[in-house]
Amino acid sequence: MHLETREIIQLLPSRFGLLMGLQAESYHRLERLFALSRREPGVVYVSSTGDGLDLRLELHARHAYTLELELSYVFEDPDTGRRAPEAQVRVYTDAHLAEALHCQPGRGRWDALDLRATPQRILRHRLRMAGFLSRWLEYLAAQGHGPHTLRVAQDLALPA
């Protein structure tokens, strides 16, 4: 069977559908990895698997239908002095989606884009961030991170 290009394109998911799929996948990975419903806002958690790359999770806020959190490793980038990589994530608990707000140290969405960015550029940026978060969460699970490796950070010097 020979398909024309436009027929193939019709079979592929839309970019928006792909974005929603990545965000749903990230939501479920975050829940499996960190049991977010059991985490308290303002508390810093550390997950250690013995590989020397401890993971830092901080739940910044819990609202009626959203959570705001940050994921990073417990070490500093020597060039920027910031934790790296780091991801700012908004979790929509009612829709079961996790949106990567940004994944660059010290830069927000509008620093990476600009206020005049086209909808196509914004969607491409959001797809890149969603893809990064999804792959990183998959890697963390493969490294053995999970609710059983997570503990409250106490007396641990963490970079700001």
Image (cartoon, rainbow, N blue to C red):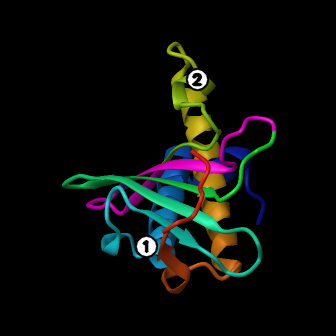
Q: Position of residue 96 (x, y in %)?
A: 35, 63
Q: Residues within 10 Å of mark 2 (few under 14, many from 20)?
A: few
Direction bottom: furthest residue: 148
Circle 2: residue type: Asp
Q: Secondary structure at mark 1?
A: helix
Identify the residue position indicated by label 1 in the image. 31
* Rendering quarter of residue 94: bottom left
- Report the residue at 66% width, 53% height from top: 132
- Report the residue at 47% width, 78% height from top: 32
* Rendering quarter of residue 80: top right
Q: How many marks?
A: 2
Direction top: furthest residue: 116
Q: Is residue 129 visible?
A: yes
Identify the residue position indicated by label 2 in the image. 111
- Image-based side of 157 in relation to 88, left or right: right
Marks 1/2: CA–CA distance:
29 Å
Q: Which residues are magenta?
A: 79-99
Q: Position of residue 60 (x, y in %)?
A: 37, 51
- Image-based side of 138 in relation to 71, left or right: right
Nearest the camera: 113 or 69?
Answer: 69
Nearest the camera: 132 or 123?
Answer: 132
Q: Is residue 85 magenta?
A: yes
Q: Is residue 49 above or below residue 24?
A: below
Q: Secondary structure at mark 2?
A: helix
Tell me the number on the disc at residue 137.
none
- Report the residue at 65% width, 71% height from top: 140
- Report the residue at 50% width, 68% height from top: 153
Q: Position of residue 26 (x, y in %)?
A: 51, 63
Q: Residues within 10 Å of mark 1 (few under 14, many from 20)?
A: some
- Quadrant in which the N terminus is drawn: bottom right
Decide: marks 1, 2 in contact (CB < 8 A)? no
- Quadrant in which the C terminus is drawn: top right
